Image (spheres, rainbow, N blue to C red):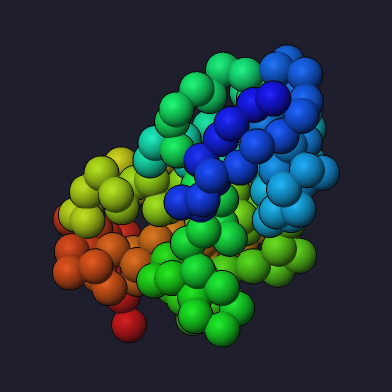
Amino acid sequence: MIELKVNGRAARVEVDPATPLLYVLRDDLHLHAAKFGCGLGQCGACTVLLDDRPVFACLLPVGAIGHRAVTTVEGLGSADAPGDVQQAFLHEQAGQCGYCIPGMIARAEALLRRTTTPSEDDMRAAMAPSLCRCGTHMRILRAVRRAAAARGGGVVDPAEPVA
């Protein structure tokens, strides 16, 4: 039996400790925002937060989590009450197919938990491990700028202003 803290709640699952966190989230806890993309930690579709740091859930064995907190996009807000990062992504229409968006939101959240005034380079570096095949990168970056501004900060040297 493995005990986890996911989105602020205790969870117990009966799985092999080597099972990737992504499978536990999707199959056992029915949290479907994080997606299976490549299974190699190269696309970022499975990104979740582990104690406020972005991790590839497809690579992380559930047995390695220990007492650290897991946060998925579902833990950041809902359709009825989106969190500020989710709201920024909606406002900027950052999702086209939407497959990468949960991982992108998780990465943006991790960045903005570290600082609400990142530099443009910080922002781009934080988002780089997640790929968007639809090409909405510029909208995604605008959404991160908007979320930073919503938290009372902003990108120090923005490539474009938040309108």
Residues 19 and 49: in front is: 19
In the displayed structure image, the side of residue 12 where residue 126 appears, left or right: left
Residues 163 and 35: in front is: 35
Q: Residue 19, image x and y in percent?
A: 75, 23
Which quadrant: the N terminus? Answer: top right
Residue located at (72% from left, 48% from top): 29
Q: Residue 57, image x and y in percent?
A: 64, 33
Residues 158 and 88: in front is: 88
In the displayed structure image, the side of residue 123 where residue 29 appears, left or right: right
In the displayed structure image, the side of residue 98 where residue 4 appears, left or right: left
Up-down relation of residue 91 to residue 1 (above or below) = below
Residue 143 picture quarter: bottom left
Residue located at (39% from left, 61% from top): 144
User: Number of callouts in the render?
Assistant: 0
Residue located at (43% from left, 30% from top): 68
Up-down relation of residue 92 to residue 121 (above or below) = below
Up-down relation of residue 37 to residue 153 (above or below) = above
Which quadrant: the C terminus? Answer: bottom left
Residue located at (46% from left, 51% from top): 8
Q: Residue 13, image x and y in percent?
A: 71, 34
Up-down relation of residue 67 to residue 149 (above or below) = above
Residue 95 picture quarter: bottom right
Residue 35 can be seen in this image: no
The residue lying furthest to the right in this view is 27
Residue 161 picture quarter: bottom left
Residue 76 can be seen in this image: yes
